Amino acid sequence: MSKPVEQDHHEDSPQLRFELMQADDYSKYLLHSQKEILFILRAMRDKGSLITVYFNQGNDFLLTSLLSVSADGSGMQFDPGSNAEMNRRALESEKLVFIASHEKVKIQFTVRRLTRTEFEGREAFRAAIPDELLRLQRREFYRLTAPIAHPLRCSIPVKLADGTESIIESTVIDISGGGLGVLVPPEGVEFEADHLFENCRLELPEVGTVLATLRVRNVFEFTLRSGTKNKRSGCEFVDLPGHMLNLIQRYIIRVERERKARETGMM
């Protein structure tokens, strides 16, 4: 029998660092087959995978694990959290987002309501099996620090403060299938959250050219060891075509393979 999962609901808890993904942004990773969804849920139950359940628009959460998944696929049971107030709020919520990592794959799904029930003589929560489930392979969004010896640069078409258009070359700090971390260009370029840059061009050595639209997600300042201050921006790819994603994955695999070869003295 599994034991209730201990919970800390403070705002600085590491559990809150999970990204709540929007299904519209990752629709190609959604599973709709009940057979596939039940298979994953049962595997998570068997492994005792830790699940974070977000509710109240993501402001509250509790930690849990699956206790059972019904044979007919009608519902699932899981542990309540250890905090009575969080449990009460969860039961009153009309939308709850479940997030877990199972065998290095990120899992996310949504349920509409919870009810109280019992499992083997003790309190438990019950919910309906979700109609869809997001299954995101980590390798697709593994973040690679760009090589220093062969730096990557992204060409970004921008509109300058005086209204003229130009193309800037921004140094890439890291790259994944989801986006880029780049050095923010000099003042005069609009680089703010949610700003879109279309027709960006990223040359991947020995792999190919990625053409993409970037959306700025965040901008923050950091200080180099020399004391110089720079700004870094996290940008996500918008509607990146599958063949462009494949180029990025090939590049990441190639660079990682070369790094491991150097570390083991094979290069």
Image (cartoon, helix red, strand yellow):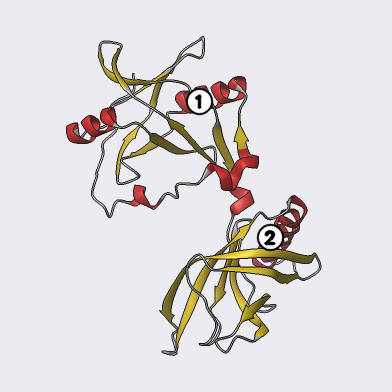
- The answer to whether one can see residue 264 in this image is no
Packing grade of label 2 (10 A; few <14, some 14-19, many >=20) is many
Is residue 108 rendered to the left or right of residue 171? left
Q: Residue 157 lies in what quarter of the image?
A: bottom right
Residue at the spot of label 2: 252
Pinpoint residue 93: horizontal percent, then vertical percent. 30, 32
Q: Are marks 1 and 2 in contact (CB under 8 Å)?
A: no
- For marks 1 and 2, give the one nearer the viewer: 1
Q: Residue at x 57, y 22 (%)?
A: 39
Residue at the spot of label 1: 41
Pinpoint residue 217: horizontal percent, then vertical percent. 49, 64
Q: Residue at x 50, y 25 (%)?
A: 41
- The answer to whether one can see residue 60 in this image is yes
Mark closer to the chain start, 1 or 2 = 1
Q: Residue 65 lies in what quarter of the image?
A: top left
Q: Residue 110 lies in what quarter of the image?
A: top left
Dot 2 lies on which element? helix
Q: Residue at x 59, y 45 (%)?
A: 26
**Above or below for 2 versus 104:** above
The three-letter code of the residue at mark 1 reads: Leu
Q: CA distance from mark 1 to mark 2?
A: 30 Å
Viewer-closest of 214 and 135: 214
Dot 1 lies on which element? helix
